[in-house]
Every structure is written in C-alpha cells, then in structure tokens.
Image (tube, rainbow, N blue to C red):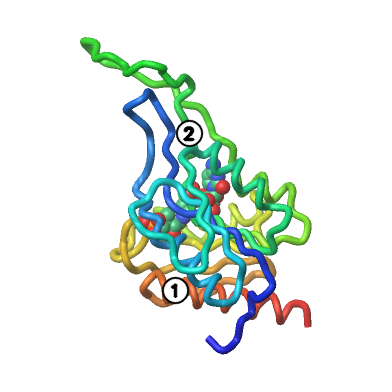
Amino acid sequence: PKDLPLKGKKVVVTAGPTRERIDPVRFLTNFSSGKMGYAMAEAAAVLGAETVLISGPVCIDAPPNVSLISVESAKDMYEAVLEEFDTASIVIKTAAVADYKPKDVHAQKMKKQPGEASIVIERTTDILAELGQRKKSQLLIGFAAETNDVIHYAKGKLEKKNADYIIANDVTEAGSGFGTETNSVTLVGKNDVEMQFPHLHKKELALQLLQTIMKLEKDETK
Ligand code: PMT
C-alpha cells in the first residue's frame, strides 16, 4: 500500500494457542494454528508499524519485519503482553488463550490408574480484560471465537473487556475459524460499528481489517 497509516506506531499482536501443562508430557490446548494472528502482524508491518508478535506454540514462520516473542502458557503470554503494553499504540489479541489451566501441575509423569481420573482446572487471567482496565491511550482490538449468537456475544465482550473493537469470528462456518486459510468475520466496535467482511484469505482479511479500523479512527478524530 502507498499509504502507511501505522507508521510511527508500535503494534503488539498475540497469536496462536497457549499450552497449560498437566505434567511434564501432557497439556491442555486448542486448535488455533496462529494463521490469523500472524496475518494481523504481517498486515501491521506492511502498513508501517513497528510490530511485536507474541505467539503461543505454532508451526508457521514469523512474517518479515516483525519481532517474535515465543511463549507457552496463558501466564507467559500475560507477562509478555504487559511488558510491551505501556509503549504500544495498538494491541491486537488474536490468540486463543486457554480460559482454564490445571490447578496442580504434576512434577512427574502421571501414572495410569484403573478406573476414571479427573483433573481440577481453574481460570487463567483474562489478558484482554486486564488490558481494558489498564489502558490509557492504547487502542484495544480483541477477537471473539463463537459458535452461536456471534454478534450478541461479541458486543458483550466489547463492553465487558473495555475493548475498542472486537472481531467476531463464527468458528462453525465452513472455511472460517481455527486452522483454515480463510476466514469470515464481523467487525464490532464502539459507536455501534458493525461491519461484515467477505470470506477472504486471512492475509487479505487482516489488511482490510486494519485499514478499516485506521480509517474509522481517523474519521473519529476529525
Ligand atoms: O489461529 P487460527 O487457526 O488462524 O484461528 C484464528 C482464531 C479462530 C483463533 C481467531 O480468529 C480468534 O477468533 N481468536 C480469538 C479466540 C478466543 O480465544 O476467543 P474468545 O472469545 O475466547 O476470547 C475473546 C478475546 O479475549 C480474545 O481476543 C482473546 O485473545 C482474549 N482472551 C481470552 C481469554 C484469556 N484468558 N485472555 C484473553 O486475552
């Protein structure tokens, strides 16, 4: 693009799943491949931002001109994001952060026992909600992976987490959501913004999302 709307801005993007250890060989996680978050980071860099990508464990390479910080658990991601937060202009939370982690992490491999077994899980910190509490001038952009009442829940998250925009993702739609090359989303924002995007490759979608958000922000300050 000729226009570099993010020049001079620091953008922090989170991507991928997190891993929550049960014992030295097992963990809880989800199906996030990192593709959507890596596409957001690539788009931010293309639009001129100094870009920091904080990523859970994935199998894809970091895009060009992006500084990669690799993390494992929700707690690691929380600490890495906080470290970058004060100097960030925009934070984009594409990561599928685990909502729960095992209460006790076993130091040794758990042995099989006859009969049923159970693991007690407890909540992780909601990173986006925490940033919503702390934010000063930062623009906060979250994602929401939903299976039903997508817009309704996305609006709820926008308010509850004090985000500026939520990118609502119906993960039950074909060619959309976890692991796919493409995605279809609705951008939900403050001032009743509700914009549906066409079904696109994640890289193209990321570029359109960021360009749209920057335009909305520019119009607002006019
Ligand atoms: O990685 P891909 O395979 O390309 O898949 C992309 C995606 C489906 C993971 C992505 O498009 C997406 O929807 N990411 C958000 C997934 C998610 O965790 O949604 P959520 O509705 O549970 O969380 C809402 C928001 O809160 C998210 O911005 C999330 O990063 C954040 N959150 C959630 C829990 C937590 N403990 N801390 C958080 O910050």
Amino acid type of disc 1? Leu
Q: Residue at x 33, y 62 (%)?
A: 173
Quadrant position of residue 176: bottom left
Task: Report whether 220 appears left or right of 104.
Answer: right
Numbered label attached to residue 205: 1
**How far apart are the two marked residues, 1 and 2, measured between alpha carbons?**
30 Å
**Residue 193 placement (x, y as % from top left):** 62, 72
Q: Are marks 1 and 2 in contact (CB under 8 Å)?
A: no
- Residue 171 visible (yes or no): no
Quarter of the image with the C terminus is bottom right
SS for callout 2 = strand
Which residue sits at x=59%, y=76%? 48
Q: Amino acid at mark 2?
A: Tyr
Mark 1 Cβ inside 8 Å of ligand 1: no
User: Which of these two is toward me, 110 or 102?
Assistant: 110
Label 1 residue SS: helix
Label of residue 25 in the image: none
User: Which residue lies at the image location 68% right of the left edge and 52% below the top edge?
Assistant: 85
Residue 205 in the image: state x and y as whole percent: 44, 74
In this rendering, is residue 122 above or below 70? above
Q: Is residue 6 left or right of residue 101?
A: right
- Can you give x and y, in whole percent of width and height, for residue 12 in the image? 59, 59
- Residue annotated with mark 2: 100
